[in-house]
Amino acid sequence: MHRALLVSDVLLYIFTYVEQLPPTIYTPSVTASPGQKCLASLAATCNAFYELAMDLLWADIYGVKPLLGCVTRLHPLVYSSLWKWGPQPAGVEPLSADEARQFLRHSTRVRSLVIELSDDGAVPLLSVIPADVCLFPRLRELRLSGSKHLELFLSHTLRDCYVYYDPEEVIPDQLPKLSDRIRLCNQLVTLSCPPLDWATWKHLSTLPTLVKIEVRSSLGAPPWLEEQHISPFLYLTSLSFTDSSAAYAATVLQHMKFPSLESFWISVETLASTEVEPFFRALSQCKQTLETLTIMWEEYNDSQRRPLTAIPHLLSLSFTQLRSLRLRSYDSCIYLDNDVLLEVMSAWPHLQALHIEECAISPSVTFHGLLTAIRQCPQLEALGILIDTVNIDVDPDAEPIQHTFLHTLRLETPESPTGNAEAIAHIIFDWLPCVYQVAQYIDESDWDEVNARLASLLCDCCTA
């Protein structure tokens, strides 16, 4: 054997390349890829190759099924294309002590693991393994969806943890159990999970490695206790919530400090008018650091049926570092006209992306208002708004003041712009020279004619 193969770094580089060999055709997940087959062959070649090849071979595992494949007795089940776990594999005995040791020799190599509810059927087979034995002592990343046995898979060594439960099907004791397990993790970098108890939030605030938290649904979240004292999250840069309302997010923001927060994202089913002011007031603690802000809601609930005046609330916060703003309403209106748009871009001249998506029947922003406003943001690269395509108010004889940074333009309109397609295409061509087409959602064709005319103008310019 060449002496170079005795150098661990050289061997790691070669094996890593081998591992990434692409499949020639699609193969089911139970079928080994070309890279995996090569690693298996290398592991069987000599002792010098064995440990590294096995570590790479078992590093990323989807489900418990591949790990049970190391038990000879279970081969007929594991590699059957018709086999699926039921509540418990019928007629299959749990692992023996020797088989459990064989299982653990492989599970200790796993670095990344995906577990789904269907894997729960395999758990009875592992009953011989003592409860205090960590099945995955080197696990770095876990994606767990629906499993009721998170204590088996949620290792204290985790760096990236993603836990998902259907809010309507979550078992009451799962959330306290999840909080207990998370408090054992001291190396977390990213965490995505259902709501945790406040003691766990307190633990997370002490982790210098944690930079990102995602909370999905507040169903079952404990009420805030006034005697709680939680240290500032000094290193957290990203925080997001997916929930039925903004109440839980507002509670977290009101009672915890995030002095380094750069990105905040929230999506709620219903945003009540009574929640708006407390929410934005709580968000104001981040006005010196926040760079990316996304707020989405399906329905706005106001007893007087007034549109949401979210933009004035945001303007009052005076964000100094804001680079990207996205407001999206699926079933309600956001008050936006030429004056408000100009005020937004004047307040945040360093914006690089602005998306305000709503369901207004009569848009109040015109092309003249848009072109006037974007001059306040010379670095704006992406823009998405609802626009009036009926009343074209740009003087065709005016000297264009071109915005050369904008290259992604997503315009929505309740009216088809077909009638003014030629005029709109000329406005975009003359004033926004780096926009080659108006982006639109999949299966939508409102802007096809505008884009066709814009493409023709660009072609004529290139051949002139």
Image: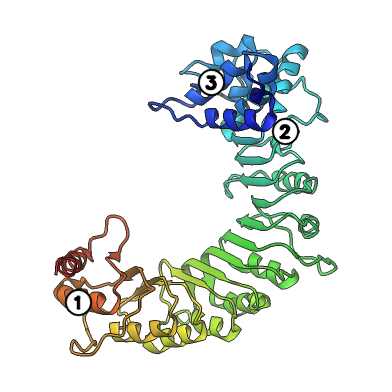
Does 4 sit left or right of 295 as displayed? right
Q: Which of 266 and 305 lies nearest the eye of the viewer?
A: 266
Task: Tell me which residue sits at (51%, 67%) in the image.
Answer: 270
Mark 2 crowdedness (10 Å alpha carbons): few <14, some 14-19, many ≥20:
some
**Residue 248, x across and y down, in percent:** 65, 65
Q: Which mark is residue 37?
A: none
Picture quarter with the N terminus: top right
Pointer 1 residue: 426
**Residue 350, x across and y down, in percent:** 51, 78
**Residue 10, x across and y down, in percent:** 63, 31
Q: Which of 437 and 212 lies nearest the eye of the viewer?
A: 437
Residue 245 against residue 373 in the figure, above or below: above
Task: Tell me which residue sits at (77%, 46%) in the image.
Answer: 185
CA separation, marks 2 and 1?
Answer: 62 Å
Pointer 2 residue: 152
Q: Which of 7 and 128 lies nearest the eye of the viewer?
A: 7
Does 232 sit left or right of 287 as displayed? right
CA separation, marks 3 and 1?
Answer: 58 Å
Can residue 94 be seen in the rendering of this structure?
no
Q: Secondary structure at mark 3?
A: helix
Task: Tell me which residue sits at (58%, 34%) in the image.
Answer: 117
Pointer 3 residue: 38
Task: Tell me which residue sits at (63%, 56%) in the image.
Answer: 215
Given contact means CB atoms under 8 Å apart, are the residues at marks 3 and 1 in contact? no
Q: Amino acid at mark 3?
A: Cys
CA separation, marks 2 and 3?
Answer: 31 Å
Q: Amino acid at mark 1?
A: His
| Marked residue nearer the N-terminal end (3 or 1) | 3
